[in-house]
């Protein structure tokens, strides 16, 4: 038997009555769906599927709405709240334990003494056998988006305009936004979220292609 | 494979799989049992150690991730002025009840005070929310942190 698994089992049994039972996580749980074969209902349409929309502006908006399936997916939007507290899971419940990530104008990396990296290390943790958590997600750049990039409970039009606005998007041009969707390691994490977590829809390549086509068609925003 | 670890200022070579949590290596391979197992899923803070001064949950930190840092556990925290000050405040406030969570609490408190020598109640809540105490010693934890803070040298 895997030594790590054995350790967890032995210690889990040994700690009954010592503490484990007191850390009930409530009915909302922590982890949600498990990673399996891609769900066809969660595919992204390809750029070519929008070619039949003759009007460029209408096509641009449709491309953004499709790309927004990723932007508004819990794997992305959980760390784009309007306050400094991340949410968790597909139910987007408040982060457990309570986390006030700080930052504000810049990314939040946790308060002095309890950085995000206290738990979120450079890689997803290995699967945690027998746990509803599945694994603890990780990435070298793990952080909460700046306040200006808050998306939760906002309309797609709001999110779209924020993405285009250099005063709220980290002073990025549209070309840089596109490159960000292709190259950014933390963006890429959304499709490799670790055991016990459903990846964002489609693939990163499909998402980047949609963003690229949205920009080429004028980066129009839904209302 | 063998990993070179620096724990509490001493060098160790441990021959373990890289994905084994640091907690097991510290407790079972090196034999320092002051660091506790509570949940194993980064929810309780009982396993908190310092990696180059930063508090981390050793139950979900793979040993290969820890090899590049100076690791400090509760056994050596008191060797430094701040750690000793926090532990003294803990004794004076009689914080401990059963004690199981307390090495993690003290490690988190020391990490807080190292970066924020005069924490507000809100600062204390933000950092210590990650450490659970089933005995409910939270008010005394807060008092001890404030006492240690007030004695900054
Ligand atoms: S044992 Fe590591 S956080 Fe609970
Ligand atoms: S003192 Fe008993 S769990 Fe904290």
Image (tube, coloured by chain):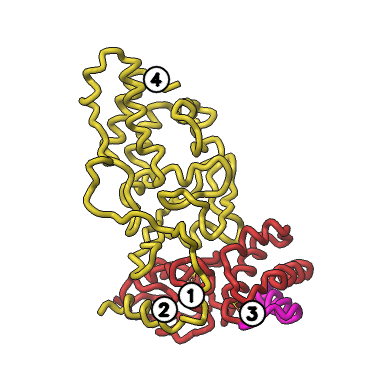
Chain colours: A yellow, B red
Q: Which residue is mark 2?
A: A12
Badge 1 or badge 2: first in the primary sequence = 2
Element at label 3: loop
Badge 4 or badge 2: first in the primary sequence = 2
Q: Is mark 1 within 8 Å of ligand 1?
A: no
Q: Which residue is mark 4?
A: A220
Callout 1: chain: A
Q: Which image quadrant is residue A60 in?
A: top left
Q: Which residue is mark 3?
A: B78
Check if mark 3 and mark 4 are on a common chain: no
Question: Measured from the top left, where is residue A79 in percent x and y?
Answer: 48, 46
The boundaries of the magenta stretch are B81-98
Residue at 54 percent across and 28 percent down: it is A167
Report, in whole angstroms, how far the alpha carbon at label 1 lies from the one at label 2: 7 Å
Callout 3: chain: B
Element at label 2: helix
Q: Which residue is mark 1?
A: A20
């Amino acid at each position: 038997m895997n030594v790590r698994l054995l350790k967890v089992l032995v210690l889990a049994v040994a700690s009954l009555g010592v503490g484990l039972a007191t850390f009930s996580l409530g009915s909302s749980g922590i982890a949600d769906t498990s990673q399996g074969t891609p769900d066809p209902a969660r595919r992204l349409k390809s750029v070519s599927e929008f070619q039949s929309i003759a009007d460029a502006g209408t096509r641009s908006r449709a491309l953004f709405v499709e790309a927004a399936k990723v932007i508004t997916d819990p794997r992305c939007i959980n760390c784009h709240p309007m306050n400094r507290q991340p949410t968790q899971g597909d139910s987007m419940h408040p982060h457990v334990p309570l986390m006030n990530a700080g930052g504000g104008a810049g990314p939040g990396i946790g308060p002095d003494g309890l950085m995000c990296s206290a738990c979120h290390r450079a890689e997803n943790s290995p699967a945690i056998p027998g746990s509803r958590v599945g694994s603890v997600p990780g990435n070298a750049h793990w952080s909460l988006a700046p306040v200006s990039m808050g998306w939760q409970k906002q309309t797609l039009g709001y999110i779209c305009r924020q993405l285009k606005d250099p005063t709220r998007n980290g002073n990025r041009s549209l070309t840089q936004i596109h490159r960000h969707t292709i190259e950014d390691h933390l963006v890429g994490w959304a499709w490799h979220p670790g055991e016990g977590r459903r990846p964002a829809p489609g693939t990163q390549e499909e998402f980047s292609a949609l963003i690229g086509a949205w920009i080429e068609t004028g980066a129009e925003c839904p209302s | 494979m063998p990993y070179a670890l620096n724990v509490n200022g001493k060098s160790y070579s441990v021959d373990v799989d890289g994905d084994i949590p640091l907690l097991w290596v510290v407790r079972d391979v090196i034999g320092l049992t002051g660091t506790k197992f509570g949940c194993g899923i980064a929810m309780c803070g009982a396993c908190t150690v310092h990696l180059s001064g930063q508090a981390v949950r050793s139950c979900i930190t793979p040993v290969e991730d820890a090899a590049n840092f100076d690791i400090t556990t509760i056994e050596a925290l008191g060797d430094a002025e701040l750690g000793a000050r926090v532990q003294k405040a803990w004794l004076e406030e009689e914080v401990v009840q059963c004690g199981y969570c307390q090495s993690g609490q003290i490690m988190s408190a020391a990490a807080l005070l190292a970066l924020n020598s005069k924490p507000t109640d809100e600062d204390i809540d933000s950092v210590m929310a990650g450490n659970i105490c089933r005995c409910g010693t939270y008010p005394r934890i807060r008092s001890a942190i404030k006492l240690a803070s007030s004695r900054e040298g």
